[in-house]
Image: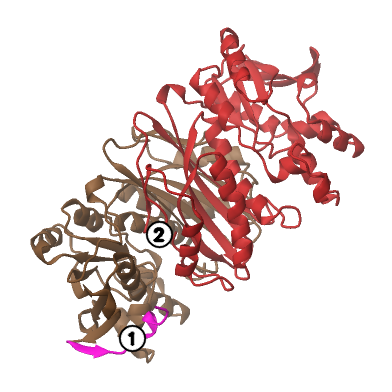
Chain colours: A brown, B red
Amino acid sequence: LTSPGNPGRLPDERTLIRHLRARLPAQPASLHIGPGDDAAVIVPERGAFQVLTTDVLVEGIHFDRRWSSLADIGHKALAVNLSDLAAMGAAPSHALLSLVLPGDTSLEELDALLDGFLELASAQKVSLAGGNLSRSPGPLMVDVTAVGYVRPRRILTRAGGRPGHGLYVTGTIGGAAAGLGLLRAGRGSPAADGADTPIHRHRRPEPRTRVGMLLGRNRAASACIDLSDGLADAVQQLAEASGTGAVVDVSALPIDAGARSWFEAQGLDPVQAALAGGDDFELLFAVPRKRGGRLRAVQRQARGVTLTRIGELTDPAEGIRLSRDGTELPLTGGFSHF
Amino acid sequence: LTSPGNPGRLPDERTLIRHLRARLPAQPASLHIGPGDDAAVIVPERGAFQVLTTDVLVEGIHFDRRWSSLADIGHKALAVNLSDLAAMGAAPSHALLSLVLPGDTSLEELDALLDGFLELASAQKVSLAGGNLSRSPGPLMVDVTAVGYVRPRRILTRAGGRPGHGLYVTGTIGGAAAGLGLLRAGRGSPAADGADTPIHRHRRPEPRTRVGMLLGRNRAASACIDLSDGLADAVQQLAEASGTGAVVDVSALPIDAGARSWFEAQGLDPVQAALAGGDDFELLFAVPRKRGGRLRAVQRQARGVTLTRIGELTDPAEGIRLSRDGTELPLTGGFSHF
């Protein structure tokens, strides 16, 4: 970690870096040089390709400190990056953490952010390899780069889908969007915040690392993408990259039960709201017909994450369509910018 | 590239990503999957360790748009990261670019930023592998992650120096700090901005990639660090990491001539100003006595970058000292927080 521009209320940068290093678990052998030098040195995994992604959370754009604790933000900043690795079928290994901190940040706040980050890192076997600390004249920003590995034949991209391949989604959708709605409506008491509630989904998304790796490992999936910008967006991106159309059966959508109640209470169409809602960080993937057995094998090892068929890829001339039990529906708001 | 939260005046995110991809040169074989999927996939260099660093430029903290063009900012955001790789002796290969853009950013401004980034990337043989676009509620931020490679025996760290090793610095110091001073004083006409002027040094620092690689390759240096936070800071960090003291002969400092004139005109002590001034992005390194021949070999291949002996590492009990032609001097401001 290097620290150009030391935030006001924090100790001087070298003290801070010592403090951060002291919080890290023992370095794995793959981390040849960790935080504290000009850069990190890692030993790439032999025979594997490396997967790299970077994603930033910006205060006022991606999170609101009224509704997420600093530990939530630390967790989510890593989670959104691990979700991108999962969508490629990669096993995560290292991360770099770049913090841009308002001048009034305290050491306790920094520690809380690290708590959330390091807890998820530990659960996902990710080592913090380096990063930097910088001062912000305004919003808090947390930029993470995540590094993972995948065997060349196991790489999942958005581009491998073909007409006739089934479309599947992991877990449930709509939860994170409903959670944000609940929080904005002042319905976010900590007591109501169990592990499966919409509010928890908004605050602490779980990257689908295991399912992504399983789908790539046994080659069940022909294409995969994560749902950072919502299911409607993901369907369009996957279909576009694969050169196909797609039809989604809205009656099959695994809409989160708590989210459905909330959307209905707000007078919203749960299908439209769930299609358009972002931040679920589930995976959308395509499966060729003859790989059904492999898909069932993935489902058996998915540790409770449900895989739901929601439609299929079609001829590109058919575009993106919605149906309900076989009847064509007009496109909803979530698909409008296609 | 992925783009959660599309900036206001820019085209929609997919159009933008197509635009960015169209600007990139042909992908090298090492970039298996470039911008456009959930993450980048690269083929690590066989037999080498990988060096990773991330550094951010924040508007109002690290740059001011009155004094740097967007192309300057794009250049500098990559340069400061390549400087960290150079300090480890690594050859740069790939970069990720994370842009946090104010809502009123135009496509022309984005293109100008990319001009500066891609020009340096091309000169340094760096491929843009991925990144993301995000909206900012306030300042412009440019966060870069740079990836490079180094053979295990050629890695330069801060920690290998021993008492008696000579201390050397590349190029000249004080230029970037003087350039910032000149710009703040309204002395920054474009006409006065030749390639070697202080203002140019502030706007477009050149990472010392070649010298860093040469120093690692023939093992001339026992320790190395870049000068992002100034020479005084670098000497302390290198000595601390190496477990030594250090003595710097201020009469030997290669202070930039234009910077010296500016500091003197301002009534500043040029030595103190040059020691404390950051952003020069030169390298400070230690050389064991018996490696003088190797150092001369590096100097011959350094393409005009001068290597200057400025002191030596000492017993740790001696701390950090300044001398002038052998006479002890009191510590200056640049060393005060040691």
Residue A28 lies in the magenta stretch: no
B50 or A25, which is in the foreground? B50
Viewer can see residue A47: yes
- Residue B36 — which label? 2
Q: Chain of mark 2?
A: B
Residue A297's place in the image compared with A62, above or below, is: above
Q: Residue lying furthest top in this view? A: B290
Residue B334 locus on image (x, y percent): 74, 33
Viewer can see residue A134: no
What residue do we see at 46% from left, 23% from top? B154
Residue B123 locus on image (x, y percent): 57, 40
**Alpha carbon of mark 2 to alpha carbon of mark 1: how far?**
25 Å
Q: Chain of mark 1?
A: A
Residue A327 lies in the magenta stretch: yes
Residue B278's place in the image compared with B223, above or below, is: below
- What is the quadrant of the C terminus of chain B in the image? top right
Q: Secondary structure at mark 2?
A: loop
